[in-house]
Amino acid sequence: MDPLWEMVFSWLRLTELDCGLMLQPWLRDIRRNGDRDVIKPGVRMWSVLAPLGPYFPDLLTPPEGALGLGSALDAIRSTPRQRLKDEFRLLDEVRPTPGWTRPVAAGDGASLLELTEAMARYHAAVVEPYTSMIEEAVETDRVHRTGVAGDVDGLLRGMWPLMNWRAPVLEVQYACDRDLHLGGRGLRLVPSYFCRGTPVAFADPGLPPTVVYPVHHDWTWQRQLASGRRQEGALAALLGTTRSAVLAAVGAGATTTELAERLGASPSSVSRHTTVLREAGLLTTERQGLSVLHQRTLLGSALLGNN
């Protein structure tokens, strides 16, 4: 998990009309319990620094993010002045930036410190409280993609359909047509919980080659289900085999149709079981457009040993 990339993508998920059903538990908790005095100015900050579009400064997501938030923020504060000037100039050409970015672009130490402190506050409000959830999804994605062999070739082949590995070329579904030659350099693959759609790379080909890609959220429920099987006997005796399977398959959230596909059952059958689980206080159900989203309550998670 790279904290800076997660922050960049998280503000987009907070502001779009449909952030995806699997992210609804996070979004709902943010809206109910989040620190608005931190989140609202944080979203405004990121909307300036990393707007939706063709470019945002690479310096905001330094490779040091692999070492943690502190190392990443130190790297941002240590950015050479010429690089700050060049990348903020490119950003201003894409979308005019407000006056508060000028001292940052000029390399003013106090302004850079203020900026990184604001980033840290945003991270503490939007990303950090959900670290265990994010790390579980990232680890599940990694295990699923690497397969049994666990080697690099297996990992790259497991990136399909986001990427197509045709040794020695990795073809990536990307927003624009470009070629990146490694020239003997390694490639860093960064799974992201909040990334959606296509992978993202640095704009500057001279930086360490990096591809950030969205994790496959639907795999997380499979891992939770497998973990829940350790308690399957006791839980099935309490709820019944089918209802215990439905409760486990909900994962971080699922629609009736998704549950039916996961369990190989009919939507009508799943709907009957979710009704019973909801009335027992183990699930909540909320309409999302034409679908309904089922989520486990704290009690439901506790029964599965996921609390």
Image (cartoon, grey):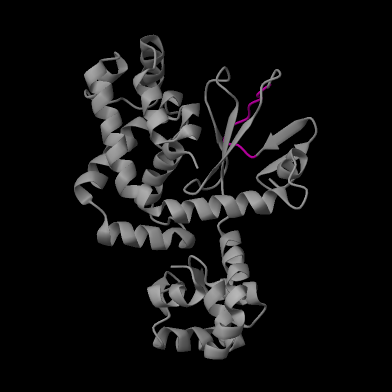
Residue depicted at x 40% and y 54%: 130
- Residue 37's place in the image compared with 175, above or below, is below
| Residue 178, magenta (yes or no) | yes
Taking the image as shown, residue 303 lies to the left or right of residue 102, namely right
- Residue 131's place in the image compared with 304, above or below, is above
Helix, strand or loop for the magenta stretch, by majority: loop
Label count reads 0
Q: Nearer the viewer, residue 194 or 96?
A: 194
User: Horizontal and vertical percent for residue 43?
Assistant: 30, 42
| Residue 234, magenta (yes or no) | no
User: Horizontal and vertical percent for residue 269?
Assistant: 58, 87
Q: Quadrant of residue 263?
A: bottom right
- Tell me if residue 183 can be seen: yes
Q: Nearer the viewer, residue 59 or 57?
A: 59
- Residue 185's place in the image compared with 218, above or below, is above
Taking the image as shown, residue 154 lies to the left or right of residue 36, namely right
Residue depicted at x 23% and y 44%: 38
- Tell me if residue 101 can be seen: no
User: Horizontal and vertical percent for residue 89?
Assistant: 37, 17
Residue depicted at x 68% and y 45%: 159
User: Horizontal and vertical percent for residue 304?
Assistant: 51, 74
Q: Nearer the viewer, residue 183 or 163?
A: 183
Outermost residue toward the right in this view: 167
Quadrant for the C terminus, please.
Answer: bottom left
Q: Quadrant of residue 72?
A: top left
Residue depicted at x 57% and y 90%: 237
Outermost residue toward the left in this view: 37
What is the magenta range? 173-181
